[in-house]
Image (cartoon, rainbow, N blue to C red):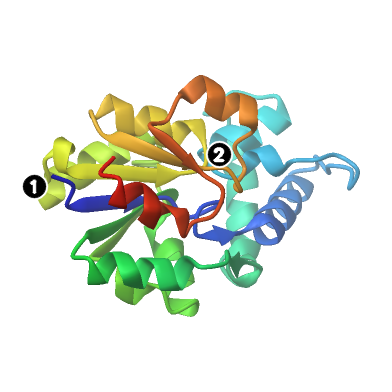
Amino acid sequence: MLKNILIDLDGTLTDPKEGITTSARYGLNKVGHPIPDSENIDWIIGPPLKASLAKLLNVDVNNDLAEQALLGYRERFAVTGLYENHVFDDVASTLEALKNKGYRLFLATAKPEIYARQILDHFDLLKYFDYPYGSELTGERTNKGELIAYILEKEQLKPEECLMVGDREHDIFGARKNDIETIAVEYGYGSKDELDEAKPKARIAKFAEILTILDRNI
């Protein structure tokens, strides 16, 4: 019986495109690697950010340049980028409906927990969650599989009683690694091909459709 729903943040609950991409460009510029405005970097939304910055810099993820770009990113994101964000339609009403149905809700994001909590609080969504789980600023738990395993252990949850909702393959694969079923949202930053390959249990075009899926007893 499903009791717990783990939910991604970026691309699932909110659209963080402006804040993330502008802050990433700021961080890359600080290390002498400006990215032209014409280059689409939306693909960095969702996966662990340091690895994406390293890819843009064409260096190893452990290279100091990637770390410096990340620090530059945070310099802007922590002050401004956090709030260059908007909540997708039906998110608040759907979270409220899920709570009213008795589900326990947990945020499961690769974003640092300190930022995730501020974002949820800013948009008045924090009240719907039992706890907003994210990564550490040191880089721990940016891997979605490790994050989900941590949540299961911390909250003493049974995988068969959990569901993961997210927009990227990392959400699907991370949940599957922990024997958890998944719903993918199609309005986020995962491409059709990416989601086709990841093979979630179900897919939804609007966040509110999760209620219909759950009524069918996924």
Splitting the image into 4 quarters, where does residue 86 fall? Answer: bottom right
Residue at the spot 47% in from the left edge and 24% down from the top edge = 198
**x, y percentage for residue 215?**
29, 52
Residue placed farthest to the left in the image? 156
Is mark 2 in CB contact (under 8 Å) with mark 1? no
Which kind of residue does numbered mark 1 sit on?
Gln
The residue carrying mark 2 is 50
- Residue 184: % across, % down: 47, 40
Q: Is residue 214 above or below residue 94?
A: above
- Compared with 48, 187 (above or below) is below
Q: In what quadrant of the picture does the N terminus appear?
A: top left
Q: Residue at x 22, y 37 (%)?
A: 149
Question: How many numbered discs sit on the rendered protein?
Answer: 2
In terms of sequence position, does the residue under pointer 2 or pointer 1 come before the other?
A: 2
The residue drawn where x is 80% and y is 42% is 32
Q: Residue 186, percent across and down?
A: 57, 43
Residue 218 % position (x, y): 29, 40
Residue 136 visible from this viewpoint: no
Which image quarter: residue 178?
top left
Crowding around mark 2 (Cα neighbors within 10 Å: few <14, some 14 to 19, many 20+) is many
SS at mark 2 in the image: helix
Q: Could you tell me which secondary element the residue under label 1 belongs to?
A: loop
Whether residue 181 sits left or right of residue 88 in the image: it is: left
**Which residue is nearer to you in this view: 209 or 42?**
209
Classify residue 99 as left or right of residue 166: left
Q: Nearer the viewer, residue 93 or 170?
A: 93
Q: Is residue 110 left or right of residue 41?
A: left
Give amino acid for label 2: Lys
User: Can see residue 22?
Assistant: yes
- Reply above or below: 204 against 80: above
Q: Which residue is mark 1?
A: 156
